[in-house]
Image (cartoon, grey):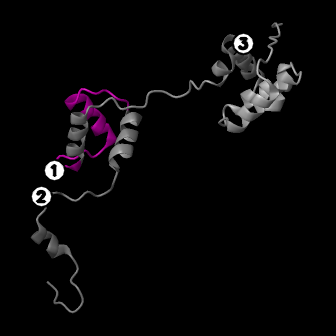
């Protein structure tokens, strides 16, 4: 059986209640845990029931608080570095490629391969997909592209005549 980790809360209850009012959604259960401990509750199962977290999370939070205090407990280490890492010149080349009527990219797979080949940037498919949609507003998967070099006179032959006009 594991040894129960008992911690003492250094902050007073009023400060914790004030902090609870300003806390973000993922920090609230942690502060609620500290409030319950300050009121005398020590059981991980009871703390888990009161906060809506799992007993494992309660144990991890207690360890964090014991090691680094309230700052360590409330630190947000989620997420990552979402910057693209592309230079302004590379972004300009991507914009030119996407807006080119004759050499435009037609799929995100093709965009991924082009980035690797031309700009020497290796990104996974979903990163390329989200980056192009977010920054350039692309919608590459569209049906029935019109050919850039089509003959407008030949197209006119196939169009239906308007009202009151002669047929072909």
Question: Disc number at residue 102?
Answer: 1
Under circle 2, the secondary element is: loop
Between 154 and 21, the one lying in front of the other is: 21
Mark 3 or mark 2, earlier in chain: 3
Say whether residue 163 is left or right of residue 55. Answer: left
Q: Residue at x 79, y 13 (%)?
A: 7
Mark 1 or mark 3, whichever is nearer to me:
3
* Residue 132 in sight here: yes
Q: Residue at x 34, y 42 (%)?
A: 132
Relative to 159, is 9 above or below? above
Q: Decide whether residue 105 is among the magenta residues.
A: yes
- Label 1, label 3: how far apart the Cα atoms are: 63 Å
Residue under circle 3?
A: 66
- Label 3, label 2: how far apart the Cα atoms are: 70 Å
* Residue 52 in sight here: no
* Displayed quadrant of residue 108: top left
The span shown in magenta is 99-124
Circle 1 packing at 10 Å, graded few (<14), some (14-19), many (20+), is few
Q: Do the residues labelled 3 and 2 touch (CB within 8 Å)?
A: no
> Residue 11 at what x, y percent from top left?
76, 22
Mark 3 or mark 2, whichever is nearer to me:
3
Between 108 and 51, the one lying in front of the other is: 51
Q: Which residue is drawn at 18% across and 52% down?
A: 101
Residue under circle 2?
A: 149
Say whether residue 41 is left or right of residue 26. Answer: right
Q: Do the residues labelled 1 and 3 touch (CB within 8 Å)?
A: no
Mark 1 or mark 3, earlier in chain: 3
Between 86 and 17, the one lying in front of the other is: 17
Q: Are marks 1 and 2 in contact (CB under 8 Å)?
A: yes
């Amino acid at each position: 059986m594991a040894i129960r980790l008992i911690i003492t809360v250094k902050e007073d209850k009023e400060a914790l209640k004030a902090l609870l009012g300003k806390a973000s959604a993922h920090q609230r259960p942690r502060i609620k845990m500290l409030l319950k401990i300050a009121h005398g509750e020590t059981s991980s199962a009871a703390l888990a029931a009161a906060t809506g977290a799992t007993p494992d999370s309660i144990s991890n939070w207690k360890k964090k608080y014991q090691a680094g205090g309230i700052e360590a407990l409330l630190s947000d280490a989620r997420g990552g570095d979402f910057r693209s890492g592309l230079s302004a010149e590379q972004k300009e080349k991507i914009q030119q490629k996407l807006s080119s009527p004759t050499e435009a990219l037609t799929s995100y797979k093709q965009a991924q391969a082009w980035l690797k080949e031309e700009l020497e940037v290796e990104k996974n498919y979903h990163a390329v997909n989200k980056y192009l949609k977010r920054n350039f507003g692309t919608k590459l998967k569209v049906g029935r592209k019109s050919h850039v070099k089509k003959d407008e006179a030949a197209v006119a032959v196939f169009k239906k005549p308007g009202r009151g006009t002669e047929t072909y």
